[in-house]
């Protein structure tokens, strides 16, 4: 198990570093949003909320908040 985790880290670490250094802010924000929403989905399922409609509604609200914050961020810099 330790070998598998070490090999995974050796493969993913350079990819993450290159993504952070070479991609634009918008691409990095989309990747961070996707990771956050995946973690949010996992947390919802672990918290005991098993109705698909509530889970999807929660993801839509979280994604809308990200879009709103991105919009506010974009207009604040101009």
Image (cartoon, rainbow, N blue to C red):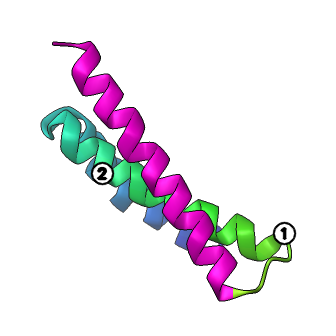
Characterize the magenta stretch by its predominant secondary structure.
helix
Residue indicated by mark 2: 30
Tell me the quarter of the image containing the N terminus.
Answer: bottom right
The local secondary structure at tag 2 comes to helix
* Residue 11 part of the magenta-drawn span: no
Of pointers 1 and 2, the one earlier in the residue sequence: 2
Please tell me whether residue 65 is drawn above or below residue 76 in the rendered image.
Answer: below
Per the image, the residue denoted by label 1 is 47
The percent position of residue 2, horizontal first and vertical second, equals 64, 67
> Residue at point 45% right, 66% down?
7
Q: Quadrant of residue 46?
A: bottom right
Q: Where the C terminus falls, by quadrant?
A: top left
Judge left or right: residue 2 versus residue 78.
Answer: right
What is the x, y in percent for residue 70? 33, 35
Q: Is 13 situated above or below 47? A: above
How far is the residue under mark 1 from the one under mark 2? 25 Å
| Residue that appears at 58% across and 71% down | 57
Residue 36, percent from left and from top: 51, 54
Q: In the figure, is residue 21 to the left or right of 43?
A: left
Asked if disc 1 and disc 2 are in contact, CB closer than 8 Å, the reply is no
What segment is highlighted magenta in the picture? 52-78
């Amino acid at each position: 198990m330790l070998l598998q985790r070490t090999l995974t880290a050796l493969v993913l670490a350079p990819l993450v570093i290159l993504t952070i250094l070479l991609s634009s802010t918008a691409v990095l924000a989309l990747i961070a949003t996707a990771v956050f929403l995946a973690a949010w989905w996992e947390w919802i399922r672990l918290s005991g909320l098993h109705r698909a409609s509530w889970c999807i509604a929660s993801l839509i609200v979280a994604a809308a908040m990200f879009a709103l914050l991105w919009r506010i961020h974009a207009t604040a810099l101009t």
